[in-house]
């Protein structure tokens, strides 16, 4: 017919490349950890929730809300090209530093257990230190990736990293929050190591950091008491050693297979912070040595997959970020579990993905989404390399 418009050809949809095995394994592992966390928060917090609000579901429902936000965060960050974070580093770093200052201002910062570490009201409270872990990691990874050819010159590599880290540590210790400060130190050290910082300088940084952490631990009475309680938990069982002794008794009563889910005795007011810092003790009591080892195995699996994602990353920035996120999660889990079982001092750090806590869960899940994006990019790079290889082209032609 005259004047009729030609029919448009349907757009050919380009199929998305399949995700690598590392991506699916990491996503599945994190999903299992989060589900374990929800179940154990419900069990560990039920008695405390009943006393606080009259309902055993209070803390579980709050954790479910934060889990939903974490799932949204991981959905966004896993689809957001990790390279684009580099342009956002200055804004994120300035914003997180501003929040660290704001939390110290009376009327804005909320004091919990002697530390002014929170912002917000009611159930919607956030901990800026969790965001700072991610932004400091992105800053270090971006700077060291840009100056990879200058790693032998500390003036443009090591010194800027230490300067920004020092400012962060200063603001963190004004709260004070030694536990998160130690984790940030691990993140920075991991990125410096992977970036190829000379071992002599790394040894110097490690020595000075260790000495500084020791001084900070001994400078305040309550931190010094925690350290002494770790060394001699039975010396003052009714005061400084109470929490660790209750934790060890709960773990011991769990035996091999545990007393059964929901049947913990420690959560009946005997073990403080049973659903936060000491949730691993409830896991060991209710699920036994088998359940505790399975949780540890999940974190070991996270370490293996995180290292693989770092090794397969398409560029230096992706490698450094993946290594930093992996070191962050593993260090925090190691310090938390070590404190619960009595082989490390108690720091107040939560167990990633499992402990009750909104800011920690959401930021950790968002960071895992970045790790998933790096793993997907690494898989795509490997497929392109295989396709360009003569053997790969021969296979494709058949």
Image (cartoon, rainbow, N blue to C red):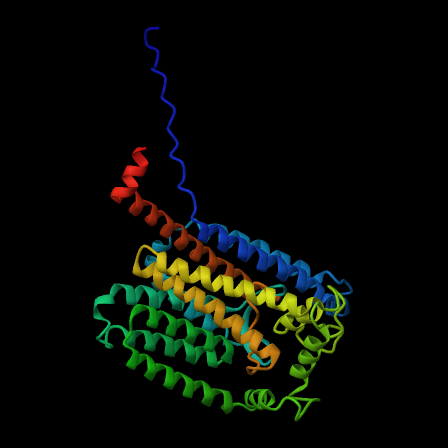
Position of residue 212 in the picture relative to residue 144 (left or right): right
Q: Quadrant of residue 206?
A: bottom left
Q: Specify whether residue 255 is in view.
A: yes
Q: State the quadrant of the C terminus.
A: top left
Position of residue 360 in the picture relative to residue 378 (left or right): right
Question: Which residue is at 33% across, 84% downward?
Answer: 204
Q: Is residue 108 above or below residue 378?
A: below
Q: Quadrant of residue 16?
A: top left
Q: Is residue 292 above or below residue 311?
A: below
Q: Nearer the viewer, residue 332 or 176?
A: 332
Q: Is residue 367 above or below residue 217?
A: above
Question: Which residue is at 43% across, 57% downward?
Answer: 371
**Residue 366, position as x, y percentages in the image:** 48, 58
Q: Nearer the viewer, residue 38 or 155?
A: 38
Question: Which residue is at 68% across, 85% downward?
Answer: 242
Position of residue 353 in the picture relative to residue 6 (left or right): right
Q: Is residue 94 above or below residue 210?
A: above
Q: Specify whether residue 359 is in view.
A: no
Q: Nearer the viewer, residue 206 or 69?
A: 206
**Residue 220, position as x, y percentages in the image:** 53, 90
Q: State the quadrant of the N terminus.
A: top left
Q: Nearer the viewer, residue 259 or 6?
A: 259
**Residue 47, position as x, y percentages in the image:** 75, 68
Position of residue 4 in the picture relative to residue 334 (left or right): left
**Residue 307, position as x, y percentages in the image:** 41, 62
Furthest-top residue in this view:
1
Task: State the count of labels.
Answer: 0
């Amino acid at each position: 017919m005259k004047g009729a418009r030609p029919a448009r050809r349907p757009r050919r949809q380009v199929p998305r490349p399949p995700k690598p095995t590392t991506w699916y394994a990491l996503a599945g592992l994190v999903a299992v950890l989060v589900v374990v966390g929800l179940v154990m928060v419900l069990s560990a917090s039920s008695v405390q929730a009943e006393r606080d609000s009259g309902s055993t579901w209070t803390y579980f429902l709050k954790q479910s809300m934060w889990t939903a936000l974490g799932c949204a965060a991981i959905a966004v960050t896993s689809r957001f090209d990790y390279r684009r974070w580099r342009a956002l580093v200055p804004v994120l770093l300035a914003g997180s530093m501003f929040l660290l200052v704001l939390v110290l201002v009376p009327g804005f910062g909320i004091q919990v257990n002697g530390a002014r570490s929170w912002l917000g009201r009611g159930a919607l409270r956030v901990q800026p230190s969790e965001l700072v872990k991610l932004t400091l990691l992105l800053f270090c990874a971006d700077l060291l990736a840009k100056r990879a050819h200058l790693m032998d010159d500390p003036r443009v590599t090591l010194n800027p990293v230490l300067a920004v880290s020092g400012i962060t540590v200063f603001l963190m210790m004004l709260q004070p929050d030694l536990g998160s400060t130690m984790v940030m130190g691990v993140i920075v050290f991991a990125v410096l190591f992977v970036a190829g910082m000379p071992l002599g300088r790394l040894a110097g940084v490690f020595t000075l950091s260790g000495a500084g952490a020791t001084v900070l631990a001994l400078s305040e009475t309550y931190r010094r008491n925690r350290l002494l309680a770790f060394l001699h938990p039975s010396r003052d069982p009714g005061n400084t050693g109470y929490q660790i002794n209750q934790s060890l008794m709960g773990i011991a009563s769990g035996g091999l297979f545990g007393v059964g889910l929901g049947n913990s005795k420690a959560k009946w007011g005997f073990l403080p912070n049973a659903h936060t810092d000491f949730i691993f003790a409830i896991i060991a009591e209710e699920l036994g040595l088998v359940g505790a080892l399975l949780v540890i195995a999940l974190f070991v699996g996270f370490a293996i997959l995180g290292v693989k994602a770092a090794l397969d990353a398409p560029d230096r920035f992706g490698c450094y970020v993946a290594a930093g996120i992996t070191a962050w999660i593993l260090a925090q889990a190691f310090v938390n579990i070590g404190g619960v079982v009595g082989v490390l001092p108690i720091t107040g750090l939560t167990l990633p993905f499992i402990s009750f806590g909104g800011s920690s869960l959401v930021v950790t899940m968002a960071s895992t989404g970045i790790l998933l994006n790096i793993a997907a990019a690494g898989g795509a790079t490997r497929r392109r390399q295989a396709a360009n290889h003569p053997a790969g082209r021969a296979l494709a032609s058949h």
